[in-house]
Image: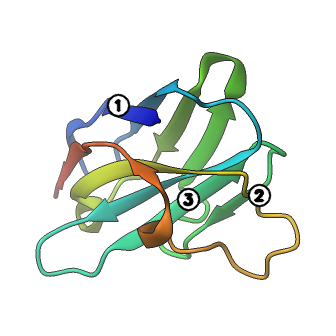
Amino acid sequence: QVQLAESGGGSVQAGGSLRLSCVASGFTHGRKLMAWFRESPGKEREDVAFVDTDGVTKYSDSVQGRFTVSLDDAKDTLYLEMNSLKPEDTAMYYCAMEKGMVLTGRERPPSTFDFAFRGQGTQVTVSS
């Protein structure tokens, strides 16, 4: 099994930055696809960023150019660097993992809804 633990959320003013971390523990070895998704009341769940163990990344249009996802596989840690934050970025942010999957060869990433593992989330609040 795999456990995921997010941290780094908080409150920030519009235009500010935050860095989220997600530490994976358990049976984490091998190829995998990791992602960040977010949920907020009244909005659809949104998959915002993906990275696999080959280093391939994908972003949603809403965060492209502002967010950067990275994976330190040696430390089993996933990061999300968020810059130029907007009030509409306010949400609970979750990390998720699907083992044995990569982005190469895929026209679009799979939905994190189908990922096997997810964390408990960290809240990000952006005020105007």
**Which disc number belongs to residue 5?**
1
Q: Which residue is mark 3?
A: 49
Classify mark 3: residues with Cα within 10 Å, few (<14), some (14-19) or many (20+). many
Q: Please give the name of the residue rendered at 80% of the width and 76% of the height, measured from the top-left corner.
A: 106
N-terminal label among 3 and 1: 1
Give the left or right position of residue 74, taking residue 21 as reference.
right
Is mark 3 in CB contact (under 8 Å) with mark 1?
A: no
Q: Please give the name of the residue rendered at 60% of the width and 74% of the height, measured from the top-left corner.
A: 110
Tell me, yes or no, if residue 115 can be seen here: yes
Amino acid type, label 3: Ala
- Distance between the Cα atoms at labels 3 and 2? 13 Å
Give the left or right position of residue 118, taking residue 39 as reference.
right
In front here: 92 or 11?
A: 92
- Distance between the Cα atoms at labels 3 and 1? 17 Å
Classify mark 2: residues with Cα within 10 Å, few (<14), some (14-19) or many (20+). many
Q: Please give the name of the residue rendered at 33% of the width and 61% of the height, measured from the top-left corner.
A: 38
Q: Is residue 19 above or below residue 38?
A: above
Q: Which residue is mark 2?
A: 102
Q: Position of residue 1 (x, y in %)?
A: 47, 36
